[in-house]
Amino acid sequence: MPRLKDGSWLPHFISVDTGQGAALKPLLDSGFLKKGTVTRVYYPDDRENTNKRVTEYDLFVTERNRRGNLCINPYYKCTVLDLFGGMGDVHRWTLRPSTDLTPLDPADQDGSQVLVLCVHGDRQNAYIVGATKHRLGPADSRADGHHYDFEFNGWRMAVNDDGECTMTYKSKTDTSGVPQDPASGGSFVKFEKDGSIVINDNEACLIRLDKPTSDITIETSGRDIVVRAARDMNTAVERDMVADAGGDWTTTVGGETLVDSKGNTKVKAPLIELTTGSTSANDGAITGQSVDPFTGVPHIDFSGVVRVKK
């Protein structure tokens, strides 16, 4: 609270105008929350960017003049409010400028619709503190219930009334939200209300982690599944393991091959062809159970012809 020369205190609602304040009043008369539309973007490396560190924006702001009439004024080089304001903790994003300034009402333009506040009411020190829903954007619906929707440049996250969360990739979008490459979009990850997780490319590939049953499902339609490991790969199954190949099955081993079976080993084939370096191995027809003389595998049960390549 200022103090006068006679020692009395000046109440906060009274001010002393030296004449300079009246001249600055038009510039300092912007202390109210106002709505605007982004018309231009200046990235830090832009020659017209004044800050050289953060992105700046020009706006068309709707406000009332001293007569109470609505008017549209330009606000230049505005910056976006940071959520944390720290060096290590930051929250950054960019806004979309209008691609068509023809509509007289900025609210009808396709640029980001923002809320503006000015420090000390100075429009030359304006900050974009938030945004409003675009009148041409998606409308709310009672059917959505308690929900959360987020979309930015083709990435969408939605939490529905059941608490299920879905993250979807639509591909890069234009200002109206239309995907620019629909063929690459559609992939999503979903966390279902029973705790299961689904990864799906919306075409032929699916991975599902089923929490109620503890099952893991991997599916592909007409495509390959490739698994590579730089070192060891271990597979342990407590019960049965089934491998069903509709075509050929090829196994290539760089070292020794060990088959350790606690029960019988059965091989069913019309022809078994073995390649060995032994000079004593010969072709023959074998029926019944035996011990394979070349691999040492016990109890091979098969009926057919064994052909030995030397």
Image (cartoon, rainbow, N blue to C red):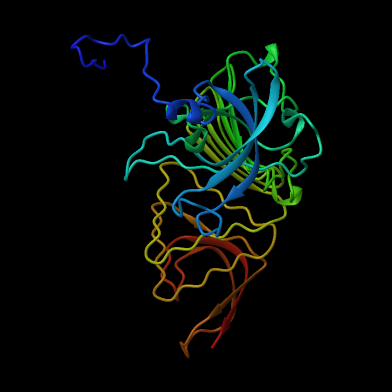
Q: Nearer the viewer, residue 189 or 118?
A: 118
User: Is 263 displayed left or right of 98 in the figure?
Assistant: left
The residue lying furthest to the right in this view is 102
**Residue 84: image location, x then y, percent:** 37, 35
**Residue 232: image location, x then y, percent:** 37, 63
Q: Residue at x 72, y 38 (%)?
A: 177
Q: Nearer the viewer, residue 285 or 157?
A: 157
Query: Hey, which quadrant is residue 193 in on the image?
Result: top right
Q: Nearer the viewer, residue 109 or 229?
A: 109
User: Is 187 displayed left or right of 260 in the figure?
Assistant: right
**Residue 149: image location, x then y, percent:** 60, 27
- Position of the C terminus, as image quadrant, is bottom right
- Position of the N terminus, as image quadrant, is top left
User: Is 43 displayed left or right of 245 in the figure?
Assistant: left
Q: Is residue 268 above or below residue 19?
A: below
Q: Is residue 217 above or below residue 210?
A: below
Q: Residue at x 60, y 48 (%)?
A: 41
**Residue 92: image location, x then y, percent:** 47, 42
Q: How many numbered badges does the structure rendering display? A: 0
